[in-house]
Image (tube, rainbow, N blue to C red):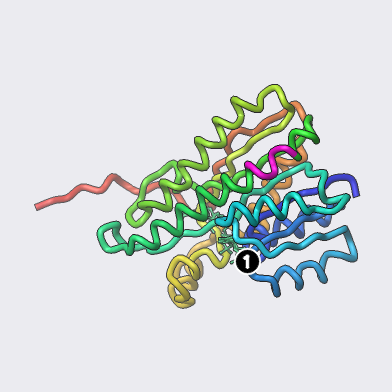
Amino acid sequence: MTQVVFITGATSGFGRATARRFAEAGWGLVLSGRRQERLEELKVELESKVPVHIATLDVRDATAVQALVDSLPAPFDKIHALVNNAGLALAPEAAQKVALQDWHTMIDTNITGLVNVTHAVLPKLLETGKGASIINIGSVAGEWPYPGGHVYGASKAFVKQFSFNLRCDLVSTGVRVTDIAPGMAETEFTLVRTKGNQAASDALYSTTTPLSAEDIAEQIFYVATLPAHININRLEIMPSRQAWGPFAVDRD
Ligand code: NDP
Ligand code: 8X3
């Protein structure tokens, strides 16, 4: 094992595919998420290839995040790449119909959670220095507005600007920062967004060709393994069959 990647939200979708991609290349893995059973399954799957450390973690809990980072045993305490992936969208309906709690959950996870993890892991990345990476998973929704995007898109706009501002502060440290902004990708994302509506999730993806979790994992791996003097600031990726829509116009 040469390097360690710390992945949040490794129990599903992009995070799990990213764990598999880095394992293929021999990286040690720190894998976190709230679903312990899924973490254990992934550890069983990957530990014959690489060292794997799993930790049940809710990124919204700053104390738990710090405790996890402080208790990492060697060799997992020397981190080369952080993939801030844990996140979710809720309530795809119009803003005026959304429960306040759903907005809070997105802010607490996509913004506060990402900030919690970044703050706790940053000292380790600074120790690694040249060639270390913070890879934040933003979204096309952070750049482009759409109906039902409300707080989700705004939270991903935060991820983009936080990433750019981190770059300014870390420019002399060797630690790179990237905002990866995927478009439509088939994961458990829509199941979560619709609070368990499998039919809605299937309907969204089945009549087009979405990105896969593996497509995004490949981009994350690419960014983390570029030569140390290259920083991709932002990588926005859509399926070929997705593009922007027209402006909304209210008519009589
Ligand atoms: P999934 O729902 O498949 O995966 C989300 C992951 O986030 C799960 O592993 C989940 O783990 C974890 N997670 C959610 N809340 C928390 C929390 N409070 N604490 C810790 N982990 C948490 O969706 P994706 O893989 O698609 O999503 C990954 C990221 O990609 C998200 O940030 C999402 O916003 C973003 N994204 C997704 C796109 C898509 O179309 N799929 C496009 C653009 C961006 P657990 O439930 O076990 O905690
Ligand atoms: C999720 C992708 O296209 O639903 O971030 O906004 S999209």
* Residue 204 forms part of the magenta stretch: no
The part of the image, by quadrant, that contains residue 194 is bottom left
Instruction: Kindly tell me whether mark 1's CB lies below 8 Å from ligand 1.
Output: yes
Q: Amino acid at mark 1?
A: Arg
To which residue does mark 1 refer?
Answer: 34
Using the image, determine if residue 191 lies above or below residue 150: below
Image point (76%, 68%), residue name: 42
In the rendered image, residue 169, in percent from the top left (x then y), is placed at 61, 26
Instruction: Tell me the magenta residue range.
Output: 119-123
Residue furthest out toward the left: 252
Q: Nearer the viewer, residue 230 or 164?
A: 164
Image point (70%, 45%), residue name: 82
In the rendered image, residue 149, in percent from the top left (x then y), is placed at 38, 53
Using the image, determine if residue 151 lies above or below residue 17: above
Using the image, determine if residue 49 lies above or below residue 234: below
Task: Indicate left or right for 170 with 184 as reference.
Answer: right
In the rendered image, residue 170, in percent from the top left (x then y), is placed at 66, 27
* Residue 120 forms part of the magenta stretch: yes
Task: Indicate left or right for 31 with 206 as reference.
Answer: right
Image point (59%, 25%), residue name: 168
